[in-house]
Amino acid sequence: MKLRSRLVIVLSVLGLALVAAPFASADGLVVKTDGGKVHGKLIGNGAVRAFQGLPYAAPPVGALRWKAPQPAAAWKGEFDATKYGHHCAQNHVFDDMTFQDAASPADLGSEDCLNLNVYTPAAKSKTKLPVMFWIHGGGYAGGGSSEPRHNGDFMPTKGVVLVTINYRLGVFGFLALPDLAAEQGGASGNYGLMDMVAALNWVKKNIASFGGDPDNVTIFGESAGSFAVSGLMAAPSARGLFAKAIGESGGAVTSGALTLEPLATAGPKEAAWVSTELGTKSLDELRAVPTEKVLAAAGKRGMVGFAPVIDGKFLTETVLDTFLAGKQAHVPLMAGFNRDEGSFMAIGMTQEKWKGMAAQRFGDKAETFMKLYPSSTDAELARSAADFGGDSFIAYGTWKWMELHRKTGSSPVYRYKLDLAAPSSKFHPGEFAFHSDDIEYIFGTIDTRPGAVWRDEDRKLSDQMMSYWTNFARSGDPNGANLPVWPKYGEGDPVLHLDNPITSRPDENRARYEFWMEEENAPAAK
């Protein structure tokens, strides 16, 4: 059977109406955008049209460094959209992050990076397709849309248009200074978040030309990308640019990592850092410092040295306060996390260390803590240590985000947990469902993970997860044919466990998260 015939059958089963037209004519690879015509290519054995490196904003360089994204310049002729644009300037963050674009020396990326990729089925549909807008993770400090695990070869075959973006990172995306605020109407920082909104506006204007529905956009992201999804749900400037949201491992509603500091306190500290590390005395001087020198100085602060702030304009209050008041975007939400988000915590843990940590950190609540995270055997200790690390790092914040939205968001919520441990690979052992383990499953790109030998159950789960995710993007409900039922997150706290096989059951760990909430709300010790 020819490739086109096989694809027609597959997409027909998915319920997509196809135009009886050439599979992918030359005309199908040329699309008109508001900036001009773009010329893409076929990928995924011809099943997907790819348009890569499309500029959604002007290069934020020179006088535009540390400014809100500005409109991209139009071009004449056809823009070559057959290769990735540069990923954004960054220091080395994670060993398992690799890029497919031609970056600058030492793979530091480039400040000229505000580009996105569009992937759409090659077979044309009679109806507008749902759009999935991916925000990569990396602690707001690393990552990019050209990572192999984000490739668009497979997800569009489920009947969606996929958009993956770059956004400014680290010091270039989140430096907040009093001088910048004075220049920019009282607000500074959050440039990376502004980039996301600019990309969403580009999608609103242009995605129909690629077969997508501008009124049915789902934002989804992992880790920092998931924190960003919760932030965009709270941001007034993003309102109306998306219809659904998916969060994978992270929510900006707690006092933990990647949460928001007021500009009034963040700004002076950043100004002192600029003066000490870069020695500049004006914004003009600061904007003239070479990229490599800025990154070298920023690298001294560790991985997550710069993060979003409450700037008074993009975000006028904490994301938590917005959700508590029910002022967030009232859209369907699907969210969850992986079983072993905190696997790092189990390394080197002993019974003595565990009990000492409990007593020192939780005081008179140490006994309660030890009941929630028991350690009667070494195996139980390892499990509890991983659970504790995961809860404090990611799980509690994601849970709290879902709890808030189901109470104040007037929209359905679906909750998952990835339990299946992937096989060992070059960078990860095989006994954990670790932080970021979900990405390749969701994109269908498991074969891009170096060194992994995949099992039938991995390939089956990947296909099921792609179906859940794309079903949700289509209708706000992840359920569909040939999939285990995914109940709404409501009475009984049902959780879908992504495993072999997939099951759903009531939340087994609510008492742990309520413990964290009590700790978070407890008065600070004097």
Image (tube, grey):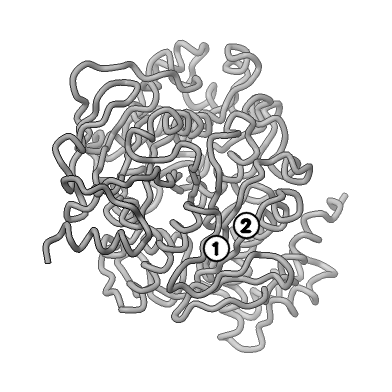
Real-space CA distance between mark 1 and mark 2, rounded to the nearest whole angstrom: 7 Å
Does residue 368 lie above or below 443 as drawn?
A: below
Viewed as shown, does residue 17 lie left or right of 37? right
- Give the x, y percent position of residue 295: 40, 33
The secondary element bearing badge 1 is classed as strand
Q: Which mark is residue 337?
A: 1
Does residue 444 lie above or below 269 as drawn?
A: below
Q: In front here: 421 or 282?
A: 421
- Give the x, y percent position of residue 486: 56, 69
| Residue at (53, 40) in percent of width and height | 242
Q: In front here: 122 or 167?
A: 122
Point out the residue furthest to the bottom here: 377
Q: Which mark is residue 191?
A: none
- Give the x, y percent position of residue 17: 33, 52
Callout 1–callout 2 Cβ contact below 8 Å: yes
Q: In the rendered structure, which amino acid carries the disc numbered 1?
A: Phe
Does residue 387 lie above or below 329 as drawn?
A: below
Q: In front here: 485 or 325?
A: 485
The secondary element bearing badge 2 is classed as helix
Q: Is residue 381 visible?
A: yes
- The residue where tag 2 is placed is 398
